[in-house]
Image (spheres, helix red, strand yellow):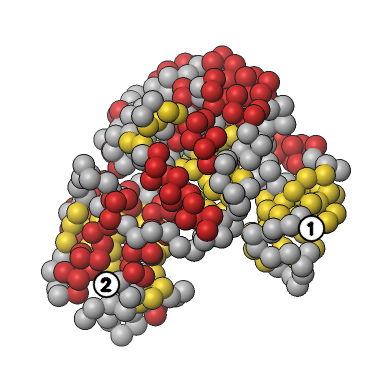
Amino acid sequence: MTPKTFKIKNFGCQMNVYDGERMAELLGAQGMAPVAESEDSDLIVLNTCHIREKAAEKAYSDVGRLRRKDGSKPLIALAGCVAQAEGAEARRRSPMIDIVVGPQAYHRLPEMVAEASCGSTSVDTDMPAISKFDSLPARRHAAPSAFLTIQEGCDKFCTYCVVPYTRGAEISRPWGDILSEANALVDGGAREIVLLGQNVNAWQNDGRGLAELIRALAKIDGLARIRYTTSHPADMTDALVAAHGEIEKLMPYLHLPVQSGSSRVLKAMNRSHTVETYLATIERMRAARPDIAISGDFIVGFPGETEEDFEATLRIVDAVRYASAYSFKYSARPGTPAAVMEDQISRDIMDDRLQRLQANINEHQLAFNRSKVGVNTQVLIERKGKHEGQMIGRSPWLQSVHVETDSKPGDIVDVTLVAAGPNSMTGAVRQKVAA
Ligand code: SAH
Ligand code: SF4
Ligand code: F3S
């Protein structure tokens, strides 16, 4: 039976969220309707993440849960990075899966669904030379803040990471395609565009880099804010740093993962930056844009990480004064060089280090938020809050801001930030700015 309804469940990073939106548009163009609950859906797409063991295992436990009480099951498509990493093996592990489709092959989803509804299973984890983007329907509706993938894949090969294997080599989407997608998103209601890539600042096309692309995007009428993520420290060019001081629409926020505060560990991770070069980049950023909010990623318990190495990580958090940061326990991933390194760290030590690191990060996050109390700024309203009349939006520094207002999602309101919590701010409206 041909499915009439679908549900896409996203795991992992923002690039999966973007891919999920594109798959939804693709299935919608085939006349299928999205539903909110898995129970009601003829087709379920699990858009998976392979970055840490827990994330990957979640994919399989979720598949198991899709069997219905009457013994029937929906059509199940395994998409995303687990699909890419496991290919046909995924069906051997879980025969309930009908379709295995990698992140570079999902433009073929409609034909794979058609095949699967006739009873045949299909696997496509090719990374074709012709980009999937050329076969996807045009963008129509967009949230106030919309994702736009401009770069995919990674050539950096950090020794712990699966991304170069699941997402393939670095590719940059062409300039013209990005501008037309951005225009379509703005026509569809986006006020902010977040440019995405596993190494977004490595984007280049026809001799032009990310700074020039942002400059061109900033000329789009109706587009108020531009962000980009995730950046690699090695690709923070002078032009991009300077752009932060020059382009008003480019928001004062930079996600720049460091992973560790020990240059010895960074070398073993194959990160290509040292503590000194990273801190120098942060200094260049702050010279260009003094109020920039810096965020980052950390891994604790990388093989061979000593207590001294870890304390150096605590010190870099103090030196950078992160406005926010994500931290993870190292997870050994099959096929990566670090998985077979000596001196794997015990779970207990990792737990302890993660707790200490997160406590330190939280202090800096709260201090950053408190430093913004009393500041007049603008909030892009994104959604309704918990109670009547409350809306939630983002400050330029990506803080979540609660505001009492009759404004709608997509409005930009002038507020004074009046209170700071660990994870959000309260704003008081000064006046509504014309939308
Ligand atoms: N391209 C980005 C990050 C991609 S993955 C970058 O280079 O910064 C997102 C984050 O997951 C990484 O920054 C890292 O902190 C974490 N991560 C990646 N592999 C991991 C692993 N094997 N174990 C634990 N955390 C990992
Ligand atoms: Fe993974 Fe490193 Fe590439 Fe980031 S730069 S995606 S951490 S290999
Ligand atoms: Fe996960 Fe793939 Fe993103 S492994 S973090 S979904 S690139």
For residue 352, what is the image quadrant?
Answer: top right
Where does the image place residue 207, in percent across and percent down from the top left? 38, 25
Position of residue 320 relative to residue 326, above or below, is above
Horizontal side of 197 relative to 403 (left or right) equals: left
The amino acid pointed to by label 2 is Leu
Residue on which disc 2 sits: 75
How many marks are shown on the rendered structure?
2
The image quadrant that residue 127 belongs to is top left
Q: Residue at x 47, y 55 (%)?
A: 184
Determine the residue positioned at 83% across, 49% down: 416
Judge by depth and name the residue closer to the eye, 256 or 207.
Answer: 207
Residue type for callout 1: Lys
Badge 1 marks a residue whose secondary structure is strand
Instruction: Tell me if residue 269 can be seen.
Output: no
Quarter of the image with the C terminus in it:
bottom right
Left or right: 179 with respect to 407? left
Q: Nearer the viewer, residue 370 or 402?
A: 402
Q: Percent position (x, y) of residue 303?
A: 41, 27
Label placed on residue 331: none
Residue 144: x percent and y percent?
A: 59, 57
- The relative height of residue 283 versus residue 99 in the rendered view (above or below) is above
The numbered mark, 2 or 1, whose residue comes first in the sequence reads 2
Residue 118 in view: yes
Residue 432's disc is 1
